[in-house]
Amino acid sequence: MQASGDRPRFNDPHIPDDVTARDLHTSARNELKTLSKENADLVARHLAMASRLIDEDPALAHEHALAASRRAGRIAIVRETLGITAYATEDFALALRELRTYRRISGKDDQIALMVDSERGIGRPDRALETGRAVDRAALTTPVRVSLAIAMSGARLDQGDLDLALGELEIPELDPDRAFEWSPMLFSARAAVLEDLGRTEEAEFWAHRADVAAEALGVDEAGDEEILIEDGLIEGDFENDEIVDLAEADAAPESDAETDNETDPQPEPSIDDEVRELLGEDIGASDDERDDAGEKPAASGTSEEA
């Protein structure tokens, strides 16, 4: 029989010995300073594992996030991590609850796109649109604003409003001649809606732009840096072979090395604003809205916040 006051035991997922608290982003570790050192280190290691596993094994990443939440359920980054991993495992009701809690704790709207998508995931496109309209888009960072536009477009598609879905993507960031970290995703979303509308040639145009932008950005390795993708990349016609010919035409004839340096400058690598980076930055949110999500609360266990 468990002694009164003892912490309940859980089968927490294994953390390799080489994973330390320092594997978690500094800003995230700073949020754990209210915990005891021992507890903060363990929570940080679980969050680091969630970040490491989110792409290859979302279910295991979610187990690590749950383990962290049992020890630090009032910390914003912990609730954000739990919401993100729940979303990755398609537990949209739990994701919505946790991301709402994160927003309440942190005061941030940086996960608004996932909240909109979570509403869509539980079959509520009307609520998804209401959620997205409730925020001040001008106050959002550009990557978040673009992600929100894509999520809102998806909600319009859920309702069968193809023209409105396309309209949600008509944002200033939709610039075919410049590539940022969000450009491939935005171009692809536009191509998909145009395809649904039967505007095949336009869809192919934007799908191709998405491919070229991704290549120009180094595919998931670029960050906020702007890349001009016009000279020999997205100028003139847009068939693949023509783009290759244009790139070669701009090359200096003396050497391939000079060609690479003069016609295809590479962006400086930086952190991509995808889920892994989100897990490494700030993450968190509120219990009052659990009924709205229609799910039981996740096991949170006993917290040891100081």
Image: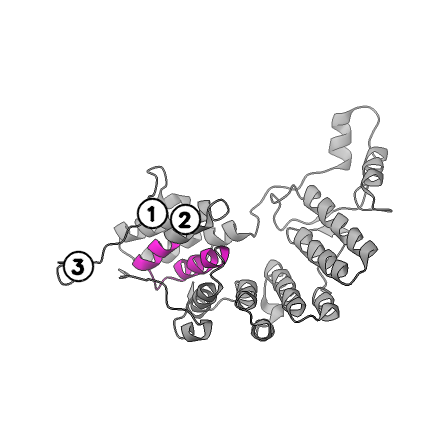
The kind of secondary structure element at disc 1 is loop
Q: Is residue 84 above or below residue 231?
A: below
Magenta region, residue range? 65-88
Q: Identity of the amino acid at label 1? A: Pro
Left or right of residue 141, residue 232 in this image: right
In the image, taking residue 84 as reference, residue 15 lies left or right, namely left
Q: Given contact means CB atoms under 8 Å apart, are the residues at marks 3 and 1 in contact?
A: no
Residue linked to disc 1: 13
| Colour scheme in use | one colour
> Residue 73: image x %, image y %?
34, 62
Q: Is residue 203 above or below residue 164?
A: above
Residue 158, image quadrant:
bottom right
Residue assigned mark 3: 6
Q: Indicate yes or no whether the magenta region holds residue 91.
A: no
Q: Are marks 1 and 2 in contact (CB under 8 Å)?
A: yes
Amino acid identity at mark 2: Leu
Point out which mark residue 60 bears. Answer: 2
Q: CA distance from mark 1 to mark 2?
A: 8 Å
Of residue 112 and residue 117, the one placed in the foreground of this image is: 117
Image coordinates of residue 200 in percent, x first then y, are 81, 56
Left or right position of 123 against 233: left
Q: Earlier in the sequence, mark 3 or mark 1?
A: 3
Tag 3's secondary structure?
loop
Camera-side residue: 190 or 145? 190
Quarter of the figure with the N terminus:
bottom left
Tell me if residue 75 is in the magenta stretch: yes
Q: Residue at x 49, y 44 (%)?
A: 56
